[in-house]
């Protein structure tokens, strides 16, 4: 019998204090716990280990121990996505690590996704070196939102992000999304109710993930995914499914650093008269000049200003 690899294996599921690991591409999950000294290494986060992490583990032996292990090492991450809770705790949580592509599922309605949420997610992807793609989902319901749809695509494609339109109901865009995910570890994330699980089911119906309805009263989604989990997709590759996120707080960034994570600002900021420049009040600011020329959207610039104010508030 071939010996299953126990080094450099991938965390494929996280449920509280338990982690399932598998030596991808072999799909043979083993339930593990963390050794105490590892647990205390990253006190600034709620989870020292995230789905997608590469780890080593020690299989346990003895009665009732077969099939279990203890994680002994976490390998360096090539990237990760981290968020800060927007509640009073302000705790940080690593959503996933070692991601090839992060897909942000966005809906203009049913429910409405706030662009402030999207921009904070995208800034974090830029800061931690995660390639991002925007999925404009439920396009079958957007008949009366065509103008808003076109404006949205113009803003984010102008910023430098691919935007694909999808519908789990009609199948629009699903094959293209499947190709983008093929052979990669892809994160699919967004607020509750945007149809993440339905999209994943469309990519591979055999997964049969649980989906939920939208609240008629609040027009908000209900949580159907409760754990962070990787699913192998029959067409090739792996999908990270995440619980819906209500808010996305940034990990502290310096005022002068934030603009580097807006690709449309990064293209011009070397032309600023002063360095560093916050692009708010300084004369000779290339970013504000690009804003006046229409090369940077007012909506994205407004998000930038909001993030500056938010970071100042919590320092």
Image (cartoon, rainbow, N blue to C red):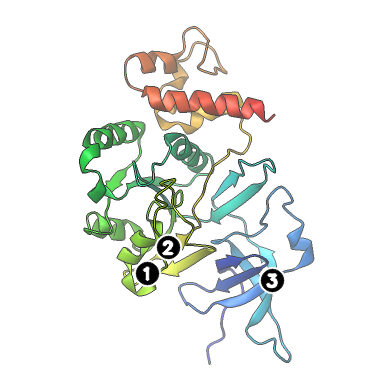
What residue sits 20% from the left and 43% below the top? 143
Name the residue at the front extreme.
Answer: 217
Position in image of residue 59 (x %, y %): 67, 81
Tell me, for residue 239, which label it has, or none.
2
What residue sits 52% from the left and 41% below the top? 124
Q: Residues within 10 Å of mark 2 (few under 14, many from 20)?
A: many
Residue matched to label 3: 33
Give the camera-side residue of 314 and 95.
Answer: 314
- Looking at the rendered image, the quarter that the C terminus falls into is top right
Whether residue 267 is visible to the viewer of this picture, yes or no, is no
Q: Residues within 10 Å of mark 1 (few under 14, many from 20)?
A: many
**Marks 1/3: CA–CA distance:** 26 Å
Which of the two discs, 1 and 2, labels the residue nearer the N terminus? 1
Q: Would you say the residues marked 1 and 2 are in contact, meaning their CB atoms lie under 8 Å apart?
A: yes
Q: Secondary structure at mark 2?
A: strand
Q: Is residue 312 left or right of residue 195?
A: right
Which of the two discs, 1 and 3, labels the residue nearer the N terminus? 3
For residue 26, above or below residue 314: below
Give the camera-side residue of 1 and 218.
Answer: 218
Q: Secondary structure at mark 3?
A: strand
């Amino acid at each position: 019998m071939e010996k299953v690899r126990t080094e450099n294996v991938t965390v494929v599921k996280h449920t509280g204090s338990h982690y399932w690991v598998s030596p991808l591409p072999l799909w043979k999950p083993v339930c593990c716990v963390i050794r105490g000294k590892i647990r205390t290494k990253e006190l600034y986060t709620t989870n020292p280990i995230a789905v997608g992490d590469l780890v080593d583990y020690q299989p346990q032996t003895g009665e009732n121990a077969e099939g279990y292990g203890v994680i002994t090492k976490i390998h360096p991450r090539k990237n990760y996505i981290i968020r800060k809770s927007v509640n009073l705790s302000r705790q940080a949580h690593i959503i996933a690590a070692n991601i090839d592509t992060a897909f942000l599922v966005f809906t203009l309605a049913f429910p409405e996704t706030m662009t402030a949420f999207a921009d904070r997610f995208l800034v974090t992807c830029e800061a931690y070196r995660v390639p991002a793609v925007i999925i404009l989902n439920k396009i079958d319901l957007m008949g009366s939102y065509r103008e808003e749809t076109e404006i949205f695509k113009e803003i984010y494609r102008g910023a430098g992000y691919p935007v694909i339109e999808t519908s789990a109901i009609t199948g629009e865009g699903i094959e293209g999304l499947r190709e983008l995910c093929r052979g990669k570890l892809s994160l699919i994330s967004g607020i509750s109710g945007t149809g993440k699980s339905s999209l994943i089911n469309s990519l591979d119906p055999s997964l049969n993930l649980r989906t939920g309805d939208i609240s008629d009263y609040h027009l908000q989604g209900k949580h159907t995914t409760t754990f962070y989990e990787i699913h192998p997709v029959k067409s090739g590759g792996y999908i990270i499914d995440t619980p819906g996120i209500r808010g996305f707080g940034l990990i502290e960034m310096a005022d002068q650093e934030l603009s580097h994570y807006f690709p449309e600002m990064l293209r011009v900021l070397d032309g600023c008269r002063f360095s560093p420049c916050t692009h708010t009040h300084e004369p000779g600011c290339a970013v504000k000049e690009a804003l006046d020329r229409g090369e940077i959207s007012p909506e994205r610039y407004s998000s930038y200003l909001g993030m500056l104010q938010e970071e100042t508030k919590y320092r």
